[in-house]
């Protein structure tokens, strides 16, 4: 395979890793949603829309089926003050450069749904920008 073609495909998720990346992306967006300790149905709807727009839905991944498990994982990380560890795990699982580049914008969209971005959300967005933007 030519170097140029290999470089092109290195940043694209393959079917085998796509579900893992989609799960991580949903977890990241849920983390942004609960950063202000307030859950808004508009934020969940925004995450669902992002999931749909990004093409996450497949025969092997469903946003609605993964939502409960992801929310439990994110809440546990926040309650246990292990947000940084969760971010490290999410960062490790998302290898697609295309998905990585879209995550900061998506996170900012989720944080801004309620027309107010508080200090905790700002701090988390800064961390997301440093890792994914």
Image (cartoon, rainbow, N blue to C red):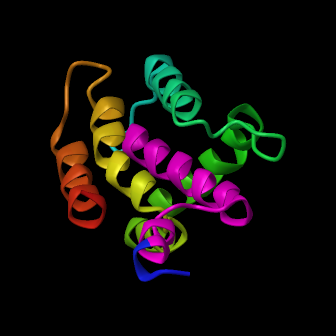
Query: Quarter holding the N terminus?
Result: bottom right
Query: Quarter holding the C terminus?
Result: bottom left
Q: Which secondary structure dominates the residues rendered in magenta?
A: helix
73 on left or right of 105: right
Query: Is residue 117 visible from the viewing direction of this image?
Result: yes
Residue 111: image location, x then y, percent: 30, 33
Magenta run includes residue 32: yes
Vertical comparison of 33 with 18: above or below: above
Name which residue lies at 51% across and 67% down. Answer: 9
Q: Nearer the viewer, residue 53 or 4?
A: 4
Residue 126: image location, x then y, percent: 18, 56
Which residues fall within the magenta stretch? Answer: 5-34
Vertical comparison of 129 with 121: above or below: below
- Please identify the quarter of the rendering in which residue 16 is found: bottom right
Q: Nearer the viewer, residue 97 or 32?
A: 97
Name which residue lies at 28% across and 57% down. Answer: 128
């Amino acid at each position: 395979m030519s170097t140029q073609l290999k470089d092109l495909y290195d940043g694209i998720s393959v079917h085998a890793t796509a579900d893992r990346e989609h799960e991580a992306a949903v977890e990241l967006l849920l983390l942004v949603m609960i950063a202000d300790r307030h859950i808004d149905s508009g934020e969940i709807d925004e995450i669902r829309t992002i999931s749909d727009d990004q093409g996450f839905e497949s025969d092997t991944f469903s946003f609605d089926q993964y939502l409960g498990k992801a929310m439990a994982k994110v809440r546990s990380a926040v309650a246990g003050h292990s947000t940084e560890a969760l971010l490290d795990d999410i960062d490790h699982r998302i290898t697609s450069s295309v998905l990585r580049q879209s995550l900061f914008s998506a996170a900012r969209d989720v944080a801004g749904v309620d027309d107010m971005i508080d200090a905790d959300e700002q701090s988390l967005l800064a961390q997301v920008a440093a890792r994914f933007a």
